[in-house]
Amino acid sequence: EGAKIFSENETYPRALLHWTRAAAQGYTVARIKLGDYHYYGYGTDVDYETAVIHYRLASEQQHSAQAMFNLGYMHEKGLGIKQDIHLAKRFYDMAAEASPDAQVPVFLALCKLGLIYLQYLQDLNLKELVSQVDLDQLLGPEWDLYLMTILALLLGTVIAYRQRQHQIVPPPRPPQEQLQAQAEEPSQAGAEDQSRRE
């Protein structure tokens, strides 16, 4: 068996030290890693408040879509920060604007956030306003699965449409016959002028 350079208990603390040094030099990925290490408790205690600080720095200073998405999730769950559905949506929207790669996960997160918001309204004694129609009786017990399927299809359609718009369409070229006809026209005109002169 080969000797291990570091024990498993030393790996995360050493990695945390290196990520800290890299983050101090402005490396965005390192700043997000610091947030992750404190969020999951890698090489340190679980500390949601410190994770929020690192994500916020990456969001404000480096405009990281990943950091914005993480802040949205922590606002959604109330982890290390006040639970706020509206701020969660704001950070999700910012992540989608910062990076095209974030649009699909943001869409799914917003769908889930919408369901959480409906539950939030019910908790505020607005159940009569939200559930005037019994969806279980109207669409069946699996109406939520149908809804997610429809939303996924709509999302696929939007993505396909955007990709099609971004494709560069080359300008149409005239057929070879038209080019030959245009090349022959001056010679024919010259022959007609010469015959008239004769």
Image: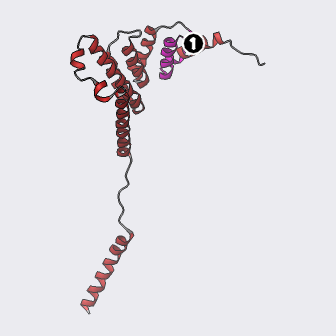
Whether residue 24 can be seen here:
no
Q: In this image, 28 relative to 185: left or right?
A: right
Q: Secondary structure at mark 1?
A: helix
Quarter of the image that includes the N terminus:
top right
Coordinates of residue 80 in the picture (x, y in percent)? 41, 9
Work out whether 24 lies above or below 187.
above
* Secondary structure, magenta segment, majority class: helix
Q: Residue at x 68, y 12 (%)?
A: 7
- What residue is disc 1 on? 17
Whether residue 49 can be seen here:
yes
Q: In this image, 36 relative to 56: left or right?
A: right
Q: Residues within 10 Å of mark 1 (few under 14, many from 20)?
A: few
Amino acid tagged 1? Leu
Q: Residue at x 37, y 44 (%)?
A: 166
The stretch in magenta equals 21-43
Choose top left, top right, bottom left or bottom right for residue 10: top right
Quarter of the image that includes the C terminus:
bottom left
Q: Residue at x 38, y 27 (%)?
A: 108
